[in-house]
Image: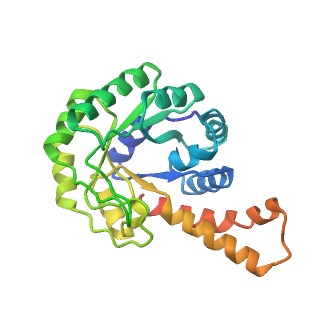
Amino acid sequence: MTIASLEPVLFHARQNRQAIAGLVVLGWEDVTAFVAAAEAENMPVILQAGPGCRAHTPLSILGPMLRYAAERASVPVVCHLDHGYEIKEIEEAIEAGFSSVMIDGSKKPLSQNIEITGRVVSIAHKAGVSVEGEIGFVGYAGTKSSKGTKPNEAVKLVEETGVDALAISAGNIHLQTDSSAIIDEKLVQKISQKIACPIVLHGASGIPYQVRRRLAKSGLVSKFNIGTELRQVFGSSLRDTLANDPDLFDRLAILSELHTPLFDATRKVISNLK
């Protein structure tokens, strides 16, 4: 299957009242389980390399790794840089083969966010790469508080940059370990009615399944970023594997036991958005 870019995948999803899962990758075991689950559901998938992943694996390794999986998948696979903050990092990701990038200017004043996002759009579009931007700040559980997206600022950023997708803040929180986030669905609807590009919600592990599905089927949200929920499955499965066989020591044997629970959990995530 040809590696997919973000814009056509999200456009098709929105037209069909579906949403696509943006799944946070930390290693090869994640990639194989995520792609297998997407194939089982016959749905596209977005493999995301975020700051945590990039802290221990260089972009020059991640790009070819994600492309290798995408080229062999039977469904469209987007190779996406999540939360890029600097132009240099965006350029490195494009050089490494990523088909989509996110420039996160959400901590900057609006004018600076527009300036850096517009520069990234210009660079990426010349290379055939899609761009996700962000307006409003999505906080982190227990640490940084969120700042909700203002509809007029969302409109201004989209119109002045030509970004392909927009991440917004509407009650969603990064790294939330339970599904108790209260999403301001009226705000999501208001923003969706005012901008042309698809909407993205980060921190979707904290959003209840029924809310994710409702936002997907209504066509309001086209991409949900999910990491914590699946990392919890990975961690609990790892603990169970070692507890069940205290003599197990081989890394490959241990990690092979995690594929099925991670596959099953990912398939549930993807199926819920169809």
Left or right of 78 in this view: 62: right
Left or right of 189 in this view: 32: right
Which part of the image, by quadrant, shows the C terminus? bottom left
Give the residue furthest to the front: 143
Front residue of this view, candidates 241 and 33:
241
Which part of the image, by quadrant, shows the N terminus? top right
**Residue 21 drawn above or below residue 114:** below
Examine the image and state in which quarter residue 194 appears. top left
Q: Is residue 149 visible to us here?
A: yes
Give the residue furthest to the left: 152
Residue at x 21% of width, y 47% of height = 192
Residue at x 48% of width, y 27% of height = 88
The location of residue 193, given as percent across then percent down, is 17, 46
Front residue of this view, candidates 205 and 268:
205
Examine the image and state in which quarter residue 55 appears. top right
The location of residue 9, given as percent across then percent down, is 43, 40
The location of residue 59, given as percent across then percent down, is 59, 35
Left or right of 120 in this view: 64: right
Front residue of this view, candidates 137 and 29:
137
**Residue 99 drawn above or below residue 153:** above
The location of residue 259, given as percent across then percent down, is 69, 62
